[in-house]
Amino acid sequence: MVIVDKEKCIGCGMCVRDCIALNIKLEDKKAGIKNECFQCGHCVAVCPAGAVSIPDYDMKDVEEYQAESFHLAPEQVLHSIKFRRSIRDYKQEKVKQSDLELLLQAGRYTATAKNNQDCYFAFVQDEVEQLKSIVWDFIEDMEKSEGRKIAKELLPYVAFNRRRKSDPKDDYLFRNAPVVLFITSDWQLDAGLAAQNIETMAVSLGMGALYNGFLARIADENEKLKKWLGIEGKTIKACMLLGYPTRHYVRTAPRQEANVIWK
């Protein structure tokens, strides 16, 4: 529920003009709420007098705008994007819980369709070896039950498992990452956007990431794993490996010319 403090409201109408649901009106030069809405928070963010609140949320979490901390230089942003690399080999160094909390906040504040905020984030670090065991057991059982009839899209997992069994140090599926993150959502884009913001935060902390589609797919098939993660009944839409890179990239990688249409 959105609440307007009539004492603070200055009747500027900015919340009325910015409300995507057309749910705010001005009466006697004061803002008022018409009906229940999906609580996107735009009215809170745009009000110059701080007169709007949403008690269902933690309003202490709301930050005031400060111009000096908001501006990002375009060339620095592009530089960061160009230097971004998928990390496939990690140092065996534990990630601090405080840094994981920052990654969570980066994901939590990501835009979601219709403000549904339905993403779940399952971070695995302390019990990553147990996670691996559950995944490999599932692949083993799958191979035994399917035999030669195993579906084509599942064949890579059989190959990963055989590599692991022939060389225990071959961790091709998990890349020796200290942290595995699963993101669930009803919307593919929501999970993808959250993952992108999490990676951006991770890079700022000296970490790197790999979007692991193979692990996301096999994990989503594994109901035992999802129950263990606490996301039973949900759909895994993204999986990330996170940690500190073993190598440093000294230049950007080349790219093809953009496929673009200007009109």
Image (tube, grey):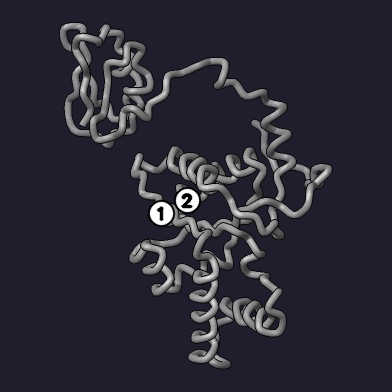
Q: Position of residue 168 (x, y in %)?
A: 68, 78
Q: CA distance from mark 1 to mark 2?
A: 6 Å
Residue at which label 2 appears: 191
Q: Quadrant of residue 44?
A: top left
Residue at left offset 35%, top offset 26% = 42
Q: Position of residue 167 (x, y in %)?
A: 72, 80
Q: Secondary structure at mark 2?
A: helix
Disc 1 crowd, CA 10 A, few/some/many (<14, 14-19, 20+): many
Q: Position of residue 65 (x, y in %)?
A: 46, 18
Q: Is residue 42 above or below residue 90?
A: above
Q: Is residue 57 visible?
A: yes
Q: Are marks 1 and 2 in contact (CB under 8 Å)?
A: yes
Q: Nearer the viewer, residue 234 or 152?
A: 234
Q: How many marks?
A: 2
The quarter of the picture where the C terminus appears is top right
User: In the picture provided, is 191 more to the left or to the right than 34?
Assistant: right
Q: Quadrant of residue 196?
A: top right
- The mark that comes first in sequence, 1 or 2, is 1
Q: Nearer the viewer, residue 165 or 194?
A: 165
Residue at left offset 30%, top offset 8% = 12
Residue at left offset 37%, top offset 30% = 61
Residue at which label 1 appears: 185
Q: Is residue 26 visible?
A: no
The residue type indicated by label 2 comes to: Ala
